[in-house]
């Protein structure tokens, strides 16, 4: 649920590329590389906007050029706006992109389809400094095999106009009441993964459904989430993907309450005059994202890819990206570099494990329930896509 915050604020043997494209999860016996050799001279990066800046957006914001100078790998960047777009680009151009920054609702799909390869984390020195809470997650590690390097994380929060919404909300249910005084001015994200937000609400309001993970929904649980979203639809004034469009709606008063990212609230508050908004993580918890840098299973530039992995999650670069994009960095050492970096880490709860306990990072829904149940079949992401089309009408 994110785009960029770029408005302002071995010598040795060459790596062996994986070539698993059967559609099944690649075997854990994949022959991992043991060394990083000389760069092959080029690298094509598929990334969230703001993750691979080369100075073209803002000449002071550039971590691509230093990588090119140090590695000899000329970088070409293509950006995407949603996880679904990223997966589509990868699946229709399976040899084009060497590396991708994937959120949890795309990463497992990439693994299952054989588009990305296991990664030898020992060849990425910065991996040792990644927050433990981001490692060994089901969206970046399968059967004990690492499929990428964690990058950073963020949460999807509840924002409201303080001059329009009173009293201050404490629950997501404020957005799901079609008879609410704010009906018609509710702003929500336009993607199938938003079904998980409804599931988070139901975990609290309808515990008899037995939802333990918002991405593991059996037939009954899934239908309840779909029904809740259909009931919510009359209250929706805006479905958004581009965060600037949500900012426009809140600025104009066309939206007064909605799902957002913390940085959007910050940017609106920093305007002159400021937009009167505030933000919380509601009492039910929230969905969120945790991104992973992954390597194409068919890459012909594996050495450049590994060099990029270590560069992009190094403390200095990870801190720059986190501040520019508006998220918590993945590298724990990124927080102590400067007072500004520490302030950014504090603002986005980088080291606050308690904050993340009830944040459900995006994850690809599968027929095998990701909550561990074996007596039920869960709805797949394809089911989610079909249902989202039906919900929106």
Image: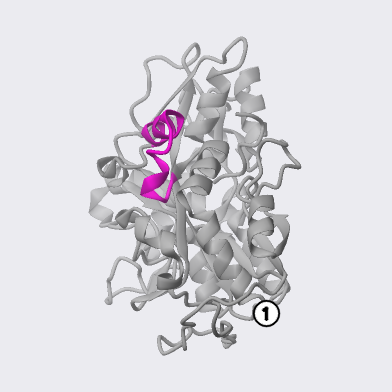
Q: Residue at x 66, y 44 (%)?
A: 62
Q: Residue at x 59, y 57 (%)?
A: 83
Q: Was residue 345 drawn as part of the magenta stretch in this picture?
A: yes
> Residue 42's image quarter?
bottom right
Q: Is residue 151 visible in this depiction of the protein?
A: yes
Instruction: Give the answer, above or below, for where 194 lies relative to 345.
Output: below
Front-lying residue, 280 or 151? 151
Q: Is residue 290 visible in this depiction of the protein?
A: no
Expressed as whole percent of the image width and height from the top left, the position of residue 344 reads 44, 33
Instruction: Give the answer, above or below, for where 267 lies relative to 137.
Output: above
329 relative to 88 in the view: left or right: left
Expressed as whole percent of the image width and height from the top left, the position of residue 313 reads 49, 55
388 relative to 61 in the view: left or right: left
392 relative to 109 in the view: left or right: right
Expressed as whole percent of the image width and height from the top left, the position of residue 220 reads 36, 61
Q: Residue at x 45, y 66 (%)?
A: 124
Q: Residue at x 36, y 64 (%)?
A: 137
Write down the region rendered in magenta. Answer: 329-348
User: What secondary structure is the stretch in magenta mostly built from?
Assistant: helix
Structure colour scheme: one colour
Q: Was residue 21 drawn as part of the magenta stretch in this picture?
A: no
């Amino acid at each position: 649920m994110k785009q960029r915050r770029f408005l302002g604020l071995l010598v040795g043997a060459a790596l062996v590329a994986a070539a698993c494209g059967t559609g099944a999860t690649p075997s854990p016996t994949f022959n991992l590389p043991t060394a990083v050799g000389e760069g092959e001279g080029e690298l094509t990066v598929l990334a969230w906007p703001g993750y691979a800046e080369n100075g073209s957006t803002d000449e002071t914001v550039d971590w691509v050029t230093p990588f090119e100078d140090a590695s000899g790998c000329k970088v070409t960047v293509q950006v995407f706006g949603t996880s679904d777009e990223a997966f589509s680009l990868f699946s229709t151009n399976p040899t084009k992109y060497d590396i991708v920054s994937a959120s949890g609702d795309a990463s497992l799909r990439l693994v299952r389809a054989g588009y990305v390869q296991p990664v030898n984390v020992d060849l990425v020195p910065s991996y040792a400094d990644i927050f433990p809470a981001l490692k060994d997650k089901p969206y970046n590690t399968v059967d004990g095999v690492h499929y990428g390097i964690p990058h950073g994380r963020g949460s999807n929060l509840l924002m409201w106009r303080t001059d329009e919404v009173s009293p201050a909300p404490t629950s997501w249910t404020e957005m799901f009441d079609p008879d609410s005084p704010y009906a018609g001015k509710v702003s929500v994200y336009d993607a199938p993964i938003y079904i998980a937000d409804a599931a988070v609400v139901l975990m609290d309001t309808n515990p008899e459904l037995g939802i333990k993970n918002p991405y593991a929904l059996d037939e009954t649980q899934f239908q309840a989430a779909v029904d809740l979203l259909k009931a919510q639809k009359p209250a929706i004034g805006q479905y958004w993907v581009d965060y600037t469009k949500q900012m426009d709606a809140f600025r104009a008063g066309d939206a007064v309450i909605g799902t957002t990212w913390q940085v959007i609230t910050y940017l609106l508050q920093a305007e002159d005059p400021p937009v009167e908004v505030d933000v919380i993580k509601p009492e039910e918890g929230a969905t969120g994202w945790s991104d992973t840098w992954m390597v194409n299973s068919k890459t012909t530039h594996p050495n450049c890819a590994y060099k990029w992995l270590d560069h992009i999650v190094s403390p200095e670069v990870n801190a720059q990206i986190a501040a520019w994009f508006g998220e918590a960095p993945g590298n724990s050492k990124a927080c102590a570099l400067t007072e500004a970096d520490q302030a950014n880490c504090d603002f986005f709860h980088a080291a606050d494990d308690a904050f993340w306990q009830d944040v459900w990072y995006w994850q690809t829904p599968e027929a095998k329930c990701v909550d561990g149940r074996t007596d039920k079949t869960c709805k797949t992401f394809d089911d989610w896509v079909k249902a989202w089309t039906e919900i929106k009408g």
